[in-house]
Amino acid sequence: MVKIDIKTPSKSYSVYIGNNVLDSLSLHLQSTHYTKLLIITDETVGKLHLEELQSAIPQSYETFIYVVPPGEKAKQFAIYEASLSFALEKGLDRKSCIIALGGGSVGDLAGFVAATYMRGIPFIQVPTTILAHDSAVGGKTGINHPLGKNMIGSFHQPEAVIYQTEFLKTLPQSEIRSGFAEAVKHALIADVSLLEFLMSNVIDLHSIKDEHLIYFLQRGIEIKANIVSQDERESGIRAFLNFGHTLGHVIESSAGYGKVSHGEAVMTGMIYALYLSKEVLDLEFNITEFELWIKKLGYSLEIPDGFDFNNAFTSMTRDKKSYSNQPRFVLLDKVGEPLVKELDKELLEKVYTTFLSSTELKK
Ligand SMILES: NC(=O)c1ccc[n+]([C@@H]2O[C@H](COP(=O)([O-])OP(=O)(O)OC[C@H]3O[C@@H](n4cnc5c(N)ncnc54)[C@H](O)[C@@H]3O)[C@@H](O)[C@H]2O)c1
Ligand SMILES: O=C(O)C(=O)C[C@@H](O)[C@H](O)[C@H](O)COP(=O)(O)O
Ligand SMILES: [Zn+2]
């Protein structure tokens, strides 16, 4: 088992990673004495892993279960409202605890329910996707709005993150691919040697070795923990974790939430940001080699039908990093050295055209 401690101004907590870390959940629940528990999970994850999670909960606990639709459908106002109603009907109080069992969608929803129920109650993340090495840590919670991704939310740190890596064994390929994008993001923004490691050891997403998986999950969490501990509420360097997300979120919302996975959209957004970084900062990086690797891993890097730069620009001006109607992008000066820059429409459109015509992306 690996334990990573996270320290933020609002809370300190631990992330437990390994094959058999549900014991850490049992210990936490035994020592904390919440009044009631509410497990929020989705239909798919519930069928696969709820029983095992329940076996780790001490019998003395009154436990309720609320099952939401899988994927981005969970991050809708209607589901958020229904989850709050369920919590009220079951009589959760301020000393009750919500447990999020699932990927980032369940974690974001359940965390936001916990953040707003009676103005905030505790919650525990039990992530079940590779992507959730990112989403379960750091306390960003929220739901989507038709006009933008995660537009309604809060910062609310979990009490603990219990990352049972056995749960990852049931992930379909598409979800492994989506989650791996955030691992690549962590490498690009913070650790050139992690990027080299990933590019030489992950050449097929069907056969990632267990020790490699644990290594990049752990390293990604360390990178995120380091940033979040310095800037919990994104007044500065936390924006680096948004690398690739300015375009990525617009791809997700314009395709219709859930049509393009978060990781696929972010991967496309990261490649666009690499082209921007070349243009604006003379980034020295072999984008062609990177694109070929990414295509071999099966990323489609597709721009949704009907995607139009002018509409995308308008949506990017609504991004949470933007102000005064000017999109702000995370760029790389070097791999591992990000910065945030306000960019104007002409430049964004020019580089978008270059990016779209990249021969490697079309292969
Ligand atoms: N809060 C943050 O810091 C943060 C960071 C990154 C991403 N996110 C958000 O996370 C969301 C994406 O999360 P995600 O990709 O983890 O997935 P998800 O929760 O949307 O799940 C994706 C699919 O995988 C299934 N699934 C989950 N675990 C499984 C398992 N072990 N076996 C089989 N199927 C399983 C789910 O049922 C669903 O169909 C996005 O909404 C994104 O915006 C948040
Ligand atoms: O933790 C962060 O900070 C991130 O930006 C991590 C991202 O991977 C994640 O997708 C996050 O939800 C995006 O945040 P948003 O503020 O742009 O909605
Ligand atoms: Zn993300």
Image (cartoon, rainbow, N blue to C red):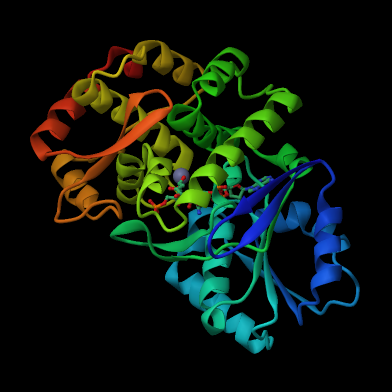
**How far across and down, in percent of the image, does residue 112 sit?**
52, 68
Q: Is residue 224 left or right of residue 337?
A: right
* Vertical position of residue 260 compared to residue 189: above or below: below
Count of numbered badges drawn on the protein: 0
**How far across and down, in percent of the image, does residue 136 sit?**
59, 52
**How far across and down, in percent of the image, does residue 275 sit?**
27, 23
Determine the residue positioned at 20% across, 29% down: 352
| Quadrant in the picture for the C terminus | top left
Tell me, yes or no, if residue 363 can be seen here. Answer: no
Determine the residue positioned at 60% across, 54% down: 7
Determine the residue positioned at 48% across, 55% down: 72
Q: Is residue 129 left or right of residue 261?
A: right
Q: In the image shown, does 201 or 13 lie closer to the viewer?
A: 13
Q: Quadrant of residue 42?
A: bottom right
* Vertical position of residue 88 compared to residue 41: above or below: below
* Vertical position of residue 223 compared to residue 73: above or below: above
| Quadrant in the picture for the N terminus | top right
Query: Seen from this angle, which residue lies furthest right?
Result: 59
Query: Seen from this angle, which residue lies furthest left?
Result: 346
Determine the residue positioned at 55% across, 84% down: 118
Q: Quadrant of residue 204?
A: top right
* Vertical position of residue 334 compared to residue 157: above or below: above
Tell me, yes or no, if residue 98 can be seen here. Answer: yes
Q: Quadrant of residue 269?
A: top left
Q: In the image shown, does 267 or 13 lie closer to the viewer?
A: 13
